[in-house]
Image (tube, grey):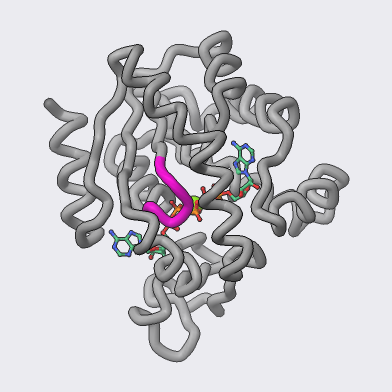
Amino acid sequence: MKLILLGPPGAGKGTQAARIAAKYGIAHISTGDMLRAEIRKGSELGLKAKSTIDRGELVSDDVIIGMVKNRIEAPDCARGFLFDGFPRTVEQAEALEEITEIDRVIDIEVPFSRLVERISGRRMCPDCGAAHHVSRVDGGRCPDCGGALYQRDDDREETVKNRLSVYERKTAPLIEFYLQRGKLLEVNGDAPIDTVGAEIFGKLEE
Ligand code: AP5
Ligand code: MG
């Protein structure tokens, strides 16, 4: 099973990806998480990517495609994988077609007016990787594992606005790209997390 989760920043890609990957036993591949891991390691790639990410711009297609090509060779991808945040440009989608065939693309739709609130309220767990909204956490600790929650550097309001505009210009055209290929499943992301999950599983199993 090879899937893509598409949707604007804050749509809930990471939240739903964790559930889908667990249910089907496939690898969850988030290019954003991979880049943040490089930044934490202090690698050359991480150092280069950090300022781009903090401005809300996209890292170059070549770097991302190289990273993904390597990642899907790993043993945990043998049963399949789920991309979260990749592809993000038509160039990336075309390169992916040369590498492997995707089964379904799940597009999580949320009105932009909701996204700024969601993202600026997001807190991340460094230990288990979960995202929680501030309104649902008590005392700055992860409700799942107790890790000390932090805010992503690119979750400040000004950067969030640029990320949304970059999404509209560069990533939204992929909806039409995958619609034309008969792979698109559209899901309403403006609903409780469990409801969104149920709609995704319902459509995948149709
Ligand atoms: P990336 O890490 O991919 O960020 P993003 O796409 O901007 O998406 P987010 O992670 O912000 O949102 P999400 O959809 O995962 O939402 P989440 O589940 O956390 O990329 C970061 C940067 O890396 C990019 O800007 C770029 O610079 C670079 N990059 C990455 N991939 C790249 C690529 N392929 N090419 C080039 N550059 C790349 O949920 C958000 C919040 O909402 C959470 O607090 C969550 O608890 C809450 N929430 C989730 N679902 C619901 C719901 N149904 N109702 C209410 N709240 C909800
Ligand atoms: Mg994410």
Whether the magenta-drawn stretch holds residue 155 is answered as no
Q: Please tell me in which quadrant of the rendered image residue 118 appears.
A: bottom left
Q: Residue at x 30, y 35 (%)?
A: 24
Q: Please tell me in which quadrant of the rendered image residue 180 appears.
A: top left
- The residue most toward the top is 98
Q: Residue at x 38, y 28 (%)?
A: 175
Could you say which is closer to the camera, residue 40 or residue 180? 180
Q: Is residue 105 above or below residue 23?
A: above
The quarter of the rendered structure image containing the N terminus is: top left
Q: Residue at x 35, y 36 (%)?
A: 25
Is 160 on the left or on the right of 179, as rendered? right
Is 135 on the left or on the right of 196, as rendered? right
List x then y, in percent, for residue 26. 39, 34
Is 62 on the left or on the right of 30, as rendered? right
Could you say which is closer to the camera, residue 198 or residue 1? 198
Q: Magenta stretch mostly in which secondary structure? A: loop
The quarter of the rendered structure image containing the C terminus is: top left
Q: Please tell me in which quadrant of the rendered image residue 179 appears.
A: top left
Q: Is residue 194 above or below residue 28?
A: below
- The magenta-colored residue range is 7-11
Q: Is residue 168 above or below residue 80?
A: below
List x then y, in percent, for residue 31. 59, 41
Total marks in image:
0
Whether the magenta-drawn stretch holds residue 9 is answered as yes
List x then y, in percent, for residue 42. 83, 55
- The residue most toward the bottom is 139
List x then y, in percent, for residue 122. 47, 70
